[in-house]
Amino acid sequence: MPGGEEAVAAERAPFAYTVIRVVPRVEREEFVNVGVVLFSRPRKFLGVRARIDADRLRALWPEIDVDAVERQLDVIQLVAGGDPAGGAIASLPPAERFGWISAPASTVVQPGPVHAGLAEDPEEALAGLFADLVGPATRN
């Protein structure tokens, strides 16, 4: 590997991410991606991007409580940010907070599988994953 490529590869760090989904009716196995949570231990980064498309959610379940979904996303953002308003879990180290956020759940708002990647800048990786998997950012 030429020196330039090796230097770039050395700057990349591993990360794990999960897509946050809204599953209005679990028995139908339909969902809408509403966010991405990315954790990079070497970069000491835990970040979330989320956006709710109420029209898409209502297309799956007209009676969905969009405000309740927003409240659940708010808690995820508080926990990821280590904000005391997120409760006791928000005071845990970032790796444990990511573990809590990414743990399987059978609720309306739930994480998908955890995936891995490499990136120089985890914030940039989060923005790219969000754009690819959820859509344009309107809520950070």
Image (cartoon, rainbow, N blue to C red):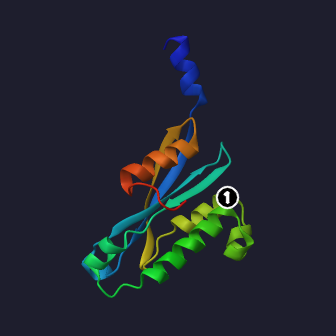
Mark 1: give few (<14), some (14-19) or many (20+) Cα within 10 Å: many
| Residue 60 x, y percent position in the rendering | 27, 77
Q: Is residue 132 left or right of residue 62?
A: right
Kindly indicate the quadrant of the structure image that contains residue 75: bottom right
Outermost residue on the top side: it is: 2
| Residue 65 x, y percent position in the rendering | 41, 85
Measuring 54% from the left and 78% from the top, which residue is drawn there? 71
- Depth order, front residue of 110/35: 35
Measuring 44% from the left and 53% from the top, which residue is drawn there? 130
Number of marks in the image? Answer: 1
Q: What element carries label 1?
A: helix
| Residue 135 x, y percent position in the rendering | 38, 55
- Depth order, front residue of 29/63: 63
Measuring 57% from the left and 44% from the top, which residue is drawn there? 122
| Residue 14 x, y percent position in the rendering | 55, 41
Quarter of the C terminus within the rendering: bottom right
48 is higher (above) or lower (below) than 121: below
32 is higher (above) or lower (below) than 15: below
Q: Is residue 133 left or right of residue 17?
A: left
- What amino acid is found at the position of numbered circle 1 in the picture? Pro
Q: Mark 1 points at which residue?
A: 94
25 is higher (above) or lower (below) than 92: below
Measuring 67% from the left and 74% from the top, which residue is drawn there? 86
Q: Is residue 36 left or right of residue 90?
A: left
132 is higher (above) or lower (below) than 105: above
